[in-house]
Amino acid sequence: MSWIDQRPDDAMDGAFTAVAPERVISVDAPIFREAMARLGAAVHIVTSAGPAGKTGFTATAVCSVTDSPAMLLVCLNRRSNSAPLLAQNGVFCVNTLGAAESGLADMFAGRSGVHLEERFNVGEWMTLKTGSPVLASAVIAFDCRTVEVKAVASHNVIFGAVEEVRLGPAGPALVYHERAYKPV
Ligand SMILES: Cc1cc2nc3c(=O)[nH]c(=O)nc-3n(C[C@H](O)[C@H](O)[C@H](O)COP(=O)(O)O)c2cc1C
């Protein structure tokens, strides 16, 4: 059997559903990481606030899913301090960073030893519908409510319905490529 077995899905009217194999065969992590380092990706700070508290982390694993309804996904390592907070709050905001914000990206990646709520002492923060922190200087903010979470190996794939979009100041965006921040 091929590793992805495609079959018609009646409910999707002719669309195809990928079926996960019983045993996943893949290349080793180091070569995959090296390959992914060459894949440039926009840098975001994903935030969340609610009953479980306020948090934020730097992420490049963000992807659009559909536009009707507007949905995106974020992949979050379950060992991250942010994982339980996002799960309990049920809301999050994807803040896409501008070219000048590599310092914030490093801080929200835990590289400067600043923890969770303290990370919000830098930058100007506001809120939209869900109450998740929105960085005023972000190029875009996608304010989301979680609609589904799928655990895949070490990560949670979190699907969010975009309840509000804020277009921030236009300008070059921040991209992570070959393990360095670059303006685009
Ligand atoms: C450029 C960059 C991109 C990252 N992308 C992700 C990501 O998509 N998902 C993720 O879980 N962690 C990602 N990380 C790592 C998290 O930002 C980091 O593990 C997390 O913030 C750890 O801090 P905490 O556990 O103290 O919150 C990325 C880090 C950097 C520097």
Image (cartoon, rainbow, N blue to C red):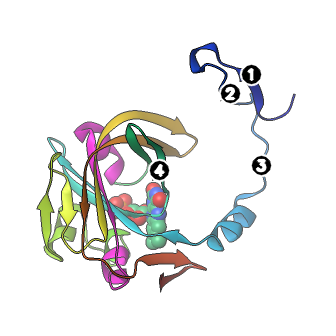
Give above or below for 125 relative to 123: above
Q: Does the magenta stretch include residue 136?
A: no
Residue 133 quadrant? bottom left
Q: Earlier in the sequence, mark 4 or mark 2?
A: 2
**Residue at image location 42% in from the left, 35% down from the top:** 149
**Residue at image location 76% in from the left, 57% down from the top:** 28
Q: Determine if the C-beta at disc 3 is less than 8 A from ligand 1.
A: no
Q: Do the residues labelled 3 and 2 touch (CB within 8 Å)?
A: no
> According to the image, label 3 marks what residue?
26
Q: Do the residues labelled 1 and 2 touch (CB within 8 Å)?
A: yes
Q: Looking at this view, name the residue that lies furthest to the top.
A: 10
> In this view of the protein, which residue sits in the foreground, 184 or 103?
184
Q: Which of marks 3 and 2 is nearer the N terminus?
A: 2
Q: Which of marks 3 and 4 is nearer the N terminus?
A: 3
Residue range of the region highlighted in magenta in the rendering: 82-106
> According to the image, label 1 marks what residue?
7
Secondary element at tag 2: strand
Q: Which of marks 1 and 4 is nearer the N terminus?
A: 1
Residue 11 quadrant? top right
Residue 64, numbered circle:
4
